[in-house]
Each structure stands twice: as C-alpha cells, then as structure tokens.
Amino acid sequence: MITKTFLACAVAVLALSGVALADIAAGLSPIQLQQIKDGQMIVAQKDMPGGVWPQLTVYTLVNAPVATVAGVFRDYDHAQDFQPNLVSAKVVSQPAPNVCVVEYTSRMPIFGTMSYTVQNTYSQSGGGVDVQWKLLKSPMADISDGSLRVEPFGTGSILRYTNYVKPKSSIAILAKGAAQGEVKNTVAALKAEAEKRAKSK
C-alpha cells in the first residue's frame, strides 16, 4: 500500500523544476554509448582522496519511462521485494516536500545486518528526474553519498547512478569487491523492476 509520505515525495518530484542538466548521453564516448545501446552496463571508477573504495558511476538503458523508473526508486514500501539484500526501507521523516529521510536495513557482505539513515532529495529538470542522497547515520561508514539521474532516451530512459562510500574502518577494504558488486546489483534490480512495471501497464 502506498503511504501518504510516499505520495508526498512523488508529488514533490513532479512539481519541482530546476536548472537543466547536461544530458547523460552527451557525457559518454561513442563507444560507451554503443555499448549502452547494445544492452551493456557501463561502470566507471574514480579514486577519491583518502578513500578506501572508489566512487562508482553506473550507466544503463531502461525500457521504461522516466516516471516509472523514478517511481520504483521512491517505492520504499516494496523496495525489499526487488532490491537485493535489502531488509526494509522506512521513511522516518519528511523535512521538506521534496526531501525524505529513510532508514534502510540491509544484509551487508562480511558485516551482517546493518541499519543506516539516508536523506533523499528529489528534483526534476530537463525532462528528467534527479535524486541526491546523503548519509546521516551509519555504524559502518563516514560517507555514503550519491545521486541518480534518469532521462528520456529513445523509447525508454537512460540512467546514471553514482555512489561513493567511505567506510569507518580500514578492515572494510576486505569487502571492497563485494561492495562494488552491490552497486551494480542495485542498478540491475532497479532496471529490472522498472521494466517489469512498464510491461504490466
């Protein structure tokens, strides 16, 4: 069942407008763009100063409208049904119409089950939808910030998902590969669920 908080966030996304961003495809090389069109997922890494893990950016095409993709990301009530290793996602507060503070509980590689709180800020520009997230509280990370940008592309959408995590402990380097895999799995799950919902309409 869709909650009032979820509906408020959805309305905020549709109501807000902002400065248009450069389109995602323009930031890709011709080779990368062709790989995307061929159904591949592009993953770019960027080393961060003082970071144990790199910042990851994932690009992929989704055979679903922008609104459907954004709706899947905002569907906190059912996120655990399609996101790997997610136990729950609960909206704990809404400090502004376009801001949702969410407590996520996940099964983490090596470390077991963990809860952390993230602030998601939604906006809309240039025909696309943006989400910016910032970690507020976590027992395992000092930083876990990122963004999602979804734009119309062809008959569907193109998606860019960026995330950077700075773990509290250097022991977290042991989980580096698994953590990077989780980012790809998260994007793949978001894509699959959006395409599933688009087909059912």
Image (spheres, grey):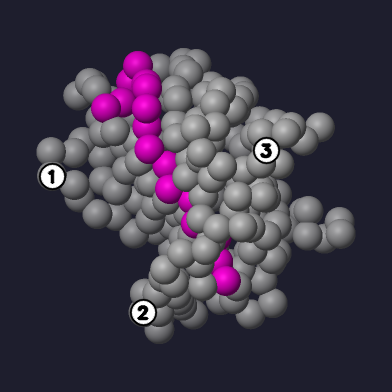
Check the image and name the residue furthest to the right. 201
Count of numbered circles on the image: 3
State the quadrant of the C terminus.
bottom right
Query: For numbered disc 3, what is the local secondary structure?
Result: helix
Image position of 64 (left or right of 23): right
Q: Which residues are magenta?
A: 127-142
> Residue 56: where, in percent of width, then height?
35, 51
Query: For numbered disc 2, what is the local secondary structure?
Result: loop
Res 3 seen here: yes
Can you tell which of label 3 and label 2 is closer to the viewer? 3
Mark 1 and 2 residues: CB-CB less than 8 Å, in contact?
A: no
Check the image and name the residue furthest to the bottom. 30
**To which quarter of the image does residue 164 belong?**
top left
Disc 1 to disc 2, C-alpha distance: 26 Å
**To which quarter of the image does residue 84 belong?**
top right
Main structural element of the magenta stretch: helix, strand or loop? strand
Image position of 181 (left or right of 164): right
The residue depicted at 45 percent of the width and 35 percent of the height is 119
The residue depicted at 62 percent of the width and 43 percent of the height is 9
Tag 1 residue: 49
Q: Which mark is residue 6?
A: 3
> Residue 117: where, in percent of width, then height?
45, 25
Q: Is residue 139 magenta?
A: yes
Considering depth in this image, is 189 or 119 the residue closer to the camera?
A: 119
Query: For numbered disc 1, what is the local secondary structure?
Result: loop
Tag 2 residue: 29
Image position of 108 (left or right of 165): right
Which amino acid is tagged 3? Phe
Res 59 seen here: no
How crowded pointer 1 is (Cα within 10 Å; few <14, some 14-19, many 20+) is rated as few
Disc 3 to disc 2, C-alpha distance: 37 Å
Which amino acid is tagged 2? Ser
